[in-house]
Amino acid sequence: MDRRGFIALGGAAAAASGFGSQASSAASRIGSGPARKPVLMKLGCQSGPSTDEHFAFFARYGIHNICAKPAVSSGRLFSTVEELEALKAMGARHQLSIDMVEPVLLPSSHIDKEPHPAIMLADSPERDRDIEAFQTMIRNCARAGIPAVKYNMSLLGVLRVGDVQGRGDSRYLSWDAANAKPATPLTRAGPVNADAFWERITYFLDRVVPVANEYKIRIACHPHDPGVPPAGYQGINRVLGTIDGLKRFVGIRESAYHGLNFCQGTISENLTDPGTQIFDVIRWFGTRKKIFNVHFRNIRGHRDKFLEVYPDEGSVDMVRALQTYIEIGYDGMIMPDHVPEVPNDPGARAASFAFCYGYIRGLLQSAERLA
């Protein structure tokens, strides 16, 4: 070896030796810090319909866990074990796990359009019949091996005032309480103050939570979307449209099987400053194991005035939000919910959902690598 080669080799060796020492030191520093918690969440979705074509859409974008709406024969208010098993079999053909189902009863709909309103109207004896059907749904899910049921306790459904121009050619739904004009002064429910609303909620939970406990099926309630001013809207006080209301809700018939379909978008809509407040709300419910499913969506705005936007452009830092779910050890599904409309979409806002799947999966993979 000539002198030039020897010097070059010696310099390279010295550099390598120095780099190795620095790398070892850096690794030692990283290892000495607090251990990162594992990422236990699963990317999911709840969009319909429950068909082979739509399940193939899920599989295409890397979804393996879903909330689905099972078939129900006409005139019945619950799915049979056979119908639930058929849903699971369809999912299995696409490598999908049915982790939660949405029953016929207690959907997110306005009471004036709801075909089965008795529970929320407190109409007896019909509400006892409908609650019995909900109990049967819980039992049948247990027999079919489906661990959770989601539901709403709403009279007003989802309130919005219209849509506005969004990013590119997309459209964003909006809410502005100051300029909202209900179609009628009252719904068919008439005036429903806070006490009356809590009575209906408690009546339902008193009869359903014991069945959920017995069969070990989680029941996950969605918050009111959005909360309204204290005077109410269409004569109704939305008691599940505040954080204090949700805290009270999960304390009624306290149970490991009674919790929330935690819609981060809706929770943000009910905060005066979601960009700073949402993380402590996640911690409060998450550390108490009351988060059974997460709708991981963003808004731009705050209580009483907001837009529904893509997850990467709203008021909430979604990276920090995901880190907060990891911090509390959340291990359920995390999924898109309301997504913007785009022109010429092939159906069910498929393009926007695909964008959200990729966004959430990217955050999850980054978090998994850091863990």
Image: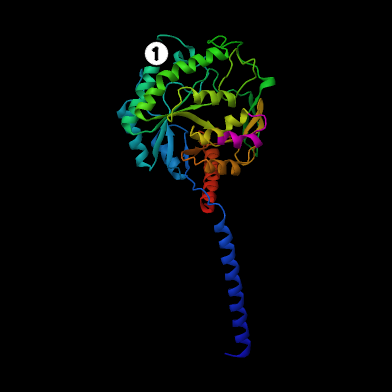
Secondary structure mostly taken by the magenta-highlighted segment of the chain: helix
Name the outermost residue toward the bottom: 2
The residue drawn where x is 56% and y is 41% is 324
Per the image, the residue denoted by label 1 is 128
Q: Note whether residue 298 is visible.
A: no
Q: Is residue 350 above or below residue 14?
A: above
Q: Position of residue 59 (x, y in %)?
A: 43, 43
Q: Was residue 60 drawn as part of the magenta stretch in this picture? A: no
Say which quarter of the image contains residue 137: top left
Q: Position of residue 28 (x, y in %)?
A: 56, 62
Observer-nearest residue: 265 or 163? 265
The residue drawn where x is 56% and y is 57% is 32
Say which quarter of the image contains residue 317: top right
Q: Is residue 349 above or below residue 25?
A: above
Q: Is residue 166 above or below residue 23?
A: above
Q: Note whether residue 152 is visible.
A: yes
Name the outermost residue toward the front: 32
Q: Is residue 61 above or below residue 148?
A: below
State which region is magenta.
Answer: 271-283
Residue 137 vs residue 198: left or right? left
Name the image quarter holding the N terminus: bottom right
The residue drawn where x is 49% and y is 18% is 201
Q: Was residue 274 drawn as part of the magenta stretch in this picture? A: yes
